[in-house]
Amino acid sequence: MNNVLPPASDAARRPPAPGSLELLRTFVNTVDLESGVDQLASPEMLAEWLSERGLLARGAKLGAADRLAAIAFREAVREVLEGNAGHADASRALARLDEIAARVPLVVRMGDRPQLDPVREAGVDLAIGRFLAIIYEAVTQGIWGRLKVCRDDVCRWAFYDSSRNRSGVWCTMAICGNRIKGRTFRQRHAESAAD
């Protein structure tokens, strides 16, 4: 798959996820929840983003329903990643992913290396199918649990936890970790002053 490098705004946060999992991580990070900037703000922007990464034919047109499906998928994955990080119950998000997966059939392709591929070869279902196949591959490789969402509820940026003990909780300690620790310190200080 083409162009799976993290965006420039992502470079200071964490190293990329391995292999095609980086493409999924980058997709989840197409919206900056803190600033509100969404790289998929229109069907045209979604089509461009997907086609630049080989997930949609160049010049393919997508509609509002395609964009809504992509956003619903992105946010369901983000909620599952919160569960991977241990700071949310992901059962409802997993159920939503199951519903989405039921509408996007996959087939096993045999070859040098067996893989899952979407049955439909067009539209947003092709991209969602590829993302589902990436999730399946990451699960089978035992690395899915390392893809997480930042604990900072203002941020919620997807990151790959490359720590040895899989204990990472922030996309970056320098930004979100310090912000959370500062908030906790100020709260404790205010509570002790009130006593």
Image (spheres, helix red, strand yellow):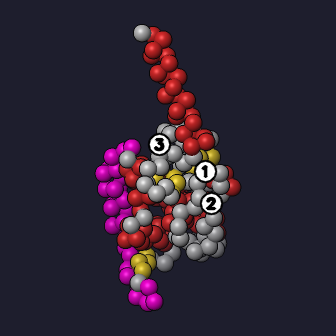
Dot 2 falls on a residue whose secondary structure is loop
In the rendered image, residue 158, in percent from the top left (x then y), is placed at 51, 53
* Residues under numbered marks 3 and 2 in contact, where contact means CB atoms less than 8 Å apart: no
**On screen, 194 above or below 71?**
above
Magenta span covers which residues?
Answer: 87-113
Q: Which label's residue is closer to the chain start, 2 or 1?
A: 2
The disc label shown at residue 81, or none: none
Farthest top residue in view: 195
Residue type at numbered disc 2? Pro
List the residue tagged with mark 3: 151
Q: Quadrant of the N terminus?
A: bottom right
Measured as percent of width and height from the top left, residue 147 is found at 46, 57
Crowdedness near tag 2: few (<14), some (14–19) or many (≥20) residues, C-alpha within 10 Å: many
Q: CA distance from mark 3 to mark 2?
A: 20 Å
Q: Which mark is residue 6?
A: 2
The answer to which image quadrant residue 104 occupies is bottom left
Label 3 CA crowd tier, 10 Å (few <14, some 14–19, many 20+) = many
169 versus 181 height, above or below: below
1 and 176: which is toward the camera: 176
Q: Earlier in the sequence, mark 1 or mark 3?
A: 1
In front: label 2 or label 1: 1
Residue 38 showing in the rendered view: no
Q: Secondary structure at mark 3?
A: loop
Q: Which residue is mark 1?
A: 13
* Mark earlier in primary sequence (3, 2): 2
The kind of residue on which mark 3 rests is: Arg
Outermost residue to the right: 8
| Residue 90 drawn in magenta | yes
